[in-house]
Image (cartoon, rainbow, N blue to C red):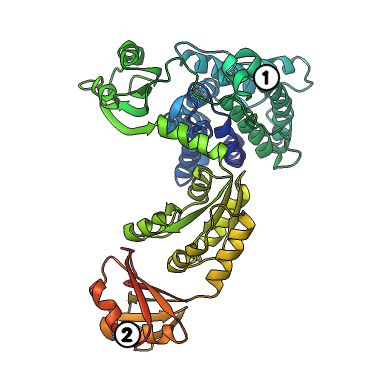
Amino acid sequence: MPDPSIERFRRVVTAASAYLDERRQEVNDLNVFPVADGDTGDNMALTLRAVAEELDRLDGQMVDEIGRTELVNALARAALMGARGNSGVILSQIVRGAAEELASRPGELVDPVLVAASMARAADAAYESVRDPAEGTMLTVFREMASSAAQKLAHMRETRLHSDASYEEQDRVLADLLAEVVRDGEQAVDRTPEQLAVLRDSGVVDAGAYGLVVIMAGIVAGLRGDIEAPQLAHHAPALGGDTRPHHADSRYRYCTNFIVTGNGLEGRGFIPSLEEIGDSVLVVGGEATLKVHVHTDHPDSAVALFEGTGDVSQLDVADMREQVAERSARLQSGRCAVVAVVAGDGIRSLYEDMGAFVVDGGETFNPSIYDLLAAIHEVPTEEVVVLPNNPNVLMAAERAAELSDKHARVVPCTAQQAGLVALVEMDPSASLDDNASLLAESVKGMRIGSVAPAARDDANGRFSAGDAVGFVSEEIVAWGEPQEVLSRTLEQLGGGAEIVTVVCGADAPIADDEVSELAPFGLEVEVHRGGQPHYWWLFAAE
């Protein structure tokens, strides 16, 4: 019989990730300690995402047959490998501590007693990972939630579950316990400004602590199937609050993270050397794998400390000064901005020159909801217009806009050349409603087209693979040699138009400066180098 706890893992991790994604920017904006770099929500979300991706990977290996012990160990390693920043590393150690307790009791049902024991061990693991733990942080709040779980056991009628307990009964008992833990966790979060002066002075609660409560609420939602999920209060930085970096050693510039793999590794032995070149040092893991985090001005020196000891990989360096500036701009600016999905270095530059924030569509032009949501949250405005620029991206963009804590609106633009032309109408000082309406109207009034090499032979015998094929909207209007097809497509597209914008692709077989010569007489053609894959030329006619 498959282990019901494994299916439960999948549900709670998925729900916890979704809950955190919904409030990720809110967590970012609360982030003032140890550095006000506005990435606590991002770092915690990336750690959970790594766990979710490991579950997906194991799913293809018949996860129901591998057993709980192997599963929790794999998830703990995934959290460690995916962790970034202080909050992400500490979260990974919470996952590790809980996993160690679960793995130590093979065959036991996951009941309130085992959950409370796992939370207690997780709290210990989190504290042990930090050299000088500060109270009023995520460490404090998780310890108090673990204590809450232990205290609730004394008043529960059902603490141990019988082996014949149904899956539904197990979920209900666990959800009832953790829902009370969430309520106590919220109160602990509210107390963090009393415990840490920097939070009190900045008018915020601790970001990581709030993120943990959000995650725990998501777990309850996963157990209950989103029925009667805990309703959490929102938190926002106080207007006029002091949000400067406060930690005494926040003078260092780069948040540096990397993995070290080898044999017989002893993480604590490296801490003194890392503290000589930086602060916020965390070195966690075991003899085979270490996760290293340090704030330093010299990331290369941090990496060099491990030369001859193990192999360094997954190096991630973030400029905290830039992050602090971006967070400040995000909280202070009320203007509207554009997030656009594009493919091609040249077209990316064209969009950025017009003030857009770009999501790389890549070869497949298929960014995830997470990619789009991350871009919306990174834009330093509170109102965002989203241009999906591809019909396959439209639904993902709409979902990202729904999940965002910001005011975001998707303009149903399905071609990146149309979005580029429409950007002329964008007014950063105007409202989201005004900008979305202007861009949507502009896109609606355009005719779009393209020329691309045929991927296969035409079933009707009109062209063969590799021949040029011209489109106006989705209709094929020309085929054959590139020069002839380009000319005929421009003619078909340009009727009644004043100007046609042409974006040339990476492998276009005709020089950019020759394109306008193939346009019909009297039609103005504006040519740009886009470098996009697949399409030789993209057209937008006004």
Quick check: can you spot residue 312?
Answer: yes
Position of residue 129 measured from the top left corner of the image (x, y, whole percent): 46, 16
Q: Is residue 259 left or right of residue 213?
A: left
The residue closer to the viewer here, 300 or 444, is 444
Label 2, label 1: how many angstroms apart (C-alpha)? 69 Å
Residue found farthest to the left: 308
The quarter holding residue 83 reads: top left
Q: Secondary structure at mark 1?
A: helix
Position of residue 98 measured from the top left corner of the image (x, y, whole percent): 54, 23
Amino acid carrying label 2: it is Ser
Position of residue 79 measured from the top left corner of the image (x, y, whole percent): 46, 31
Position of residue 329 measured from the top left corner of the image (x, y, whole percent): 51, 38
The residue closer to the viewer here, 412 or 309, is 412
| Label 1: few (<14), some (14–19) or many (≥20) C-alpha neighbours in 10 Å | many
- Quarter of the image with the N terminus is top right
> Nearer the observer, disc 2 or disc 1?
2
The quarter holding residue 288 reads: top left
Amino acid carrying label 1: it is Ala
**Contact, CB < 8 Å: mark 2 with mark 1?**
no
Which numbered dot is residue 83? none
Q: Secondary structure at mark 2?
A: helix
Q: Residue at x 74, y 29 (%)?
A: 176
Please give the count of numbered marks on the rendered protein. Answer: 2
Residue 181 higher or lower than 489, as above or below: above
| Label 2: few (<14), some (14–19) or many (≥20) C-alpha neighbours in 10 Å | some
Mark 2 or 1 closer to N-term? 1
Q: Which residue is mark 1?
A: 188
Q: Which residue is mark 2?
A: 487
Q: Is residue 100 left or right of residue 19?
A: left
Quick check: can you spot residue 13?
Answer: no
